[in-house]
Image (cartoon, rainbow, N blue to C red):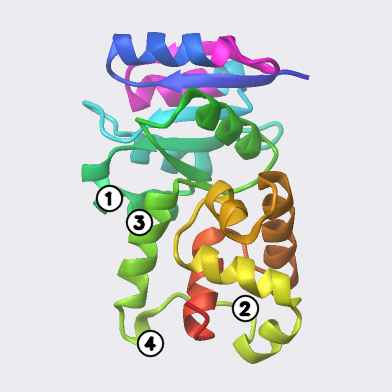
Amino acid sequence: MSVRVLVVDDQEIVRTALRLVIDRREGLSVIGEAADGERAFALAVELRPDVVLMDIRMPGTTGIEATRRISAEWPGPGPAPRVLLLTTFDLDEYVHEGLRAGADGFLLKNSAPEQLARAIRATAAGESVLAPSVTRRLIDTLTALPPALLPALDAPVAEGVELLTERELQVLVLVGRGLSNARIGEALGLTEANVKSRVNRILTRLGLENRVQAALFAHRAGLN
């Protein structure tokens, strides 16, 4: 089945470009467009997309507020669509707020078309998608906090490390440095698909939800 996408951006030229990129990819289709967060929420309820591709900064209701409404006020039936936020290098302060609002991922606006398509498919499949540079900034921010203020992790560090194979530990170290799957593959001589599979196994074994938590785990374990 095709992944149905709602595109949200206040600039028509950006929406048009995103639609062209998405509609040209097999298994992806744009089913609607919105220019602000208020309309995005209304269309999401009406059209029931699988993924909402949402700009963060828009006039009126922002992408973060629309994400919060989709997460907290979804009327059903069925689950709320997953939200992939679009960010730029100068909007890092919104990433933390977006996570709290319920966003499932963050992608940079200058991402390559294939990266955008992969991110949409991954988001639809239930994965958390974070652009490597966004991951790195989140890691830097979190690891600068006093231990008492760090987010809680369910996995005990010592026991968690023992659950991983040597290769998985190598992958985890590089996740902790904010590297993408492609770059991890280059460093370790693995295919990108193999790295993705190993990252997913790491998350499952450690009871973690996304790469930021994995990177924070690596920092606490002294692996990076």
Question: Which residue matches tag 1?
Answer: 92
Query: Residue 170, relative to residue 100: is it above or below?
Result: below
Nearest-to-viewer mark from 2 and 1: 1
Q: Residue at x 68, y 82 (%)?
A: 160
Determine crowd level at label 3: few under 14, some 14-19, many 20+ residues with C-alpha closer than 10 A.
few
Q: Residue at x 29, y 38 (%)?
A: 88
Question: Which residue matches tag 3?
Answer: 96
User: Which mark is drawn over residue 154?
Assistant: 2
Query: Residue 53, relative to residue 92: is it above or below?
Result: above
Nearest-to-viewer mark from 1 and 3: 1
Magenta span: 22-44
**Circle 3: element type:** helix
Q: Are marks 1 and 3 in contact (CB under 8 Å)?
A: no
Q: CA distance from mark 4 to mark 1?
A: 22 Å
Q: CA distance from mark 4 to mark 3?
A: 18 Å
Locate residue 40: give its quadrant.
top left
Lower sequence index among marks 2 and 1: 1
Question: Residue 64: where, in percent of width, then height?
Answer: 35, 41
Locate residue 136: give its quadrant.
bottom left
**Circle 2: element type:** loop
Q: CA distance from mark 3 to mark 2?
A: 20 Å
Question: Residue 127: where, in percent of width, then height?
Answer: 64, 46
